[in-house]
Image (spheres, rainbow, N blue to C red):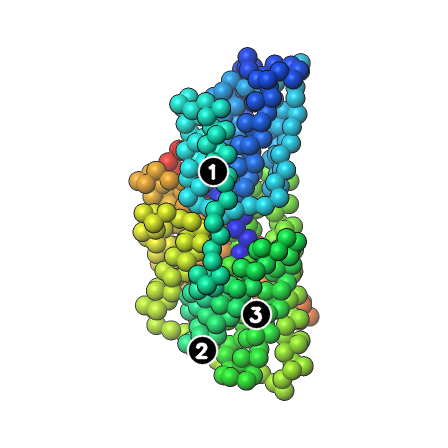
Amino acid sequence: MHPTALRILTAPLEPRPSPPSPHVEAGTTPDADDAARFFLLLAESLHVFGMGAHNIERALYRVAHSLGVTGQFLVTPTSSIFTLGPVEAPRTHMARVYGQELDLERLTELHRIVRRIVEGSLTAEQATVELTELRRPRRPWRALPSALAHALTAAGAAVILQGGWGEVLTAGGLGVVLGLLLHVTERRPGFEAITPLVAGLVSALLVGLSAAWIAPVVLYIPTLAAIITLLPGLTLTVAINEVAQGHTVAGSARLTGVMMTLLQLGFGVALGKSVTARLTDGLAVADPVGLPTWVVVVAAAVVVTTFAMRSWVRERDLVLVLFTAMVGLAASKLGGVYLGPELGVCAAAWAIGTTGNLVSRVANVPAATAVLPALLLLVPGSIGFGSISSLMAQDVVTGLQAAVTMVVVAFSLVTGLLLASLTTRPADLF
């Protein structure tokens, strides 16, 4: 999963004119240079920790206003362009971002830095020091814990996808393989661009060989469960949210990235199936057998917990994350029964967003800390993957139907989050 976008619940703040600052004058004075370096670092930090374009602009405008700096800001998913200084002598700068991190603990700290600037208790010079410290790289996960986390996530996802114990064991074993593969590829520059293709190929190939030589399984369940962390469902949701907020350039760019990821995953799976067909005489396909409800609840808790741990959620916030996820899961089940799948997702997203906003107020953390892990159970990336897989298999009708369903579910999810932002507000960390 491309963990690309955080703080999707906060409504954008309209740009407000701010008075010219005595610290940002024409020319290349030291004050102007310091201001430029500060905003370059702040914009890059907001990007790296995955905030949406509208939230980044909101933060930059509020910081500029609080510092008395005249500024105009334009944000895209990979860059920020901003102009500082009065109209008579503006200075334009650009911050280019090449990577993003899903670090919810540091996202909380970043929000608090911005809030202290807005409140006037932190100067730009002090904030620069704290932002520089915040950007220091973490020690990466070791190979074995990373593989175990992927295995637990894949096994739990197989349960949620209505798989039986055979699918769960197959998905867990495949999660170990993919966890080790991703651990290696993260340390090889340039390989990240084709990681979804390789993951889809390995997943389909190993699942097919396991079904042919070991025990029959429902093929799509362990395949999809193993690559669930690579599905760009969250990115798709944020992209549609950006479009809904009027940031069409940023939203369109993210949608393009979503389609490229889905195409790579679909092509990799199609290639893996083709190779499997040549290596085996035929696949024994089992019928889906769901597990009891209590197992599904436990599996959902496991998926959310492992995702939260890999996203560096603080231990003291983990209970709040699990509570939000369970509320969303219950709302999803009830909504699906009484409202149908599309409106059910909307109801579940509203429940998650509302709970996350309340948790934000209680714990004084960004709403995204509780909301993002819970959304993993709702995001429509799996539907998009099914659409691409059908198109690759030349089942055009099924593929287009799944694509339309994916967009409808994504809109339904965003609508629920927007409704949650109207009924409850998160803690205003900045």
**Separation of marks 2 and 3 at Cα, in angstroms:** 15 Å
Q: Residue at x 35, y 64 (%)?
A: 297
Identify the amino acid type marked 2: Gly
| Residue identified by numbered label 1 | 134
* Disc 3 crowd, CA 10 A, few/some/many (<14, 14-19, 20+): many
| Residue identified by numbered label 3 | 203
Q: Position of residue 36 (x, y in %)?
A: 59, 25
**Mark identifier at residue 313:** none
Q: Residue at x 47, y 58 (%)?
A: 142
Quadrant the C terminus occupies: top left
Q: Residue at x 41, y 44 (%)?
A: 105
Identify the amino acid type marked 1: Leu
Dot 3 or dot 1: first in sequence order is 1
Dot 2 or dot 3: first in sequence order is 2
| Residue identified by numbered label 2 | 166
Q: Element type at marker 2?
A: helix
Dot 1 or dot 2: first in sequence order is 1
Identify the amino acid type marked 3: Ser
Q: Is residue 193 above or below residue 67?
A: below
Q: Is residue 247 above or below residue 412?
A: above
